[in-house]
Image (cartoon, rainbow, N blue to C red):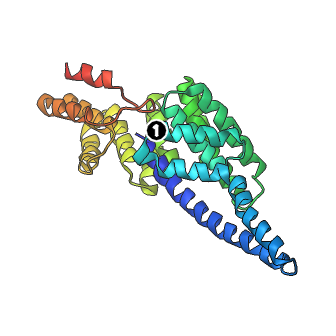
Amino acid sequence: MLLNFYWDRRKADIMNRSTRLRIGGQIILLFPLILLWTIPASVKIVLMTLWPVLLVIYYYPSILSYIAFIMYNTKGKTFYLKLMASAYKSKRVDPESAATYSYILLKDGQLEKSSEVLDYAENRAKEMIHWRKGKNRYNHVHSYRALILWKEDRMDDAADLLINLLKENYRTSVLYANLGWFLIKLQKYDEALAVNLEALEYDRSNAILDNIGLTYMKMGDLEKSHEFYTELIGKDPDFPDAWFNFGQLLEQKGIGEEAQKMFRKSLDCEFSYLGTVTKEEVELAIK
């Protein structure tokens, strides 16, 4: 359910960094030309031939991370994980790329490896915390920890982590979507409603609409829930949770035939280790 939100944010981050990388590389390439102005031409040629090679070696982890990310949609998860494993071995991957790698590992069900990579990402981000926007960078990386805590059956800790980030004025659609769902699962419906309504003002995303619709359903306000699910389904969401939850709502309202259509529609979506509903649950609901 949450992959698109992480992916869209990550795409913006990595495109910005790739631009900085390109500009920085051009400056670095020009710098030796000025320093070596009085050196014989033959020496200049040799050094300037070596210089791009040294740059590629230096930026190798970043280059691999960039290629892995850009090619994810066409080459798939296996290709991404293979390239990122090579980049990660250098221990020079930037914190955001490492956090994304951790997330994809977690989505693949590799909980232990995901936690190890995120440890690295958090430590790297902490080293840069006094840099410009360093605190925001650390909070971004640290927010991924909530997903790992959830999968370690520590949902209370996961929710507390995100609540503390909110108190530090760190806000993203992903954070709101995760926290809203954690509070629902913890059956803290009043808190969940408050967070989800605040989230709705921040970003009317599909995951947040799903959360608020589910919250109202759990609180027994089926009409209010139906209002938000009607809006969500009208946007043709690509995660199974939305269709399944709407099906449950219709079932509670006694519209069984339509509920079955929603359950079957959810089977057309991709199921994930990080999803809030499993394929087995949907199939059981259909039976």
Q: Is 65 left or right of 254, judged from the image as shown?
A: right
Looking at the image, residue 105 lies above or below residue 128:
above
Which of 145/256 is in front? 145
Which of the two residues, 155 or 126, is positioned nearer the viewer here? 126
Where is the N terminus found, in terms of image quarters?
A: top left
Residue occupying the point 69% across, 68% down: 24
Q: Is residue 228 above or below residue 281?
A: below
| Residue that mark 1 sits on | 77
Left or right for 196, reference 129: left
Question: Residue 79 location in percent, x, y?
Answer: 49, 40
Single out the residue that lies furthest toward the front: 42
Q: Position of residue 28 (x, y in %)?
A: 74, 69
Examine the rendering and report whether any part of residue 260 can be seen: yes
The residue sitting at the left extreme is 257
Find residue 237 and report its image quarter.
top left
Viewer-side residue, 178 vs 32: 32
Q: Quadrant of residue 131?
A: bottom right
Which residue corresponds to the image point at 22% horizontal and 31% vertical from the top-left?
263
Asked whether 218 or 32 is in front, the reply is 32
**As shown in the figure, which amino acid type bears the numbered disc 1?**
Lys
Q: Outermost residue, bottom direction?
A: 38
161 w.r.t. 50: above or below: above
**Mark 1 crowdedness (10 Å alpha carbons): few <14, some 14-19, many ≥20:** some
- Image coordinates of residue 34 in percent, x first then y, are 81, 79
Across and down, in percent, residue 121 comes to: 68, 42
For residue 145, side relative to residue 201 (left or right): right
Identify which residue is drawn at 45% across, 32% down: 274
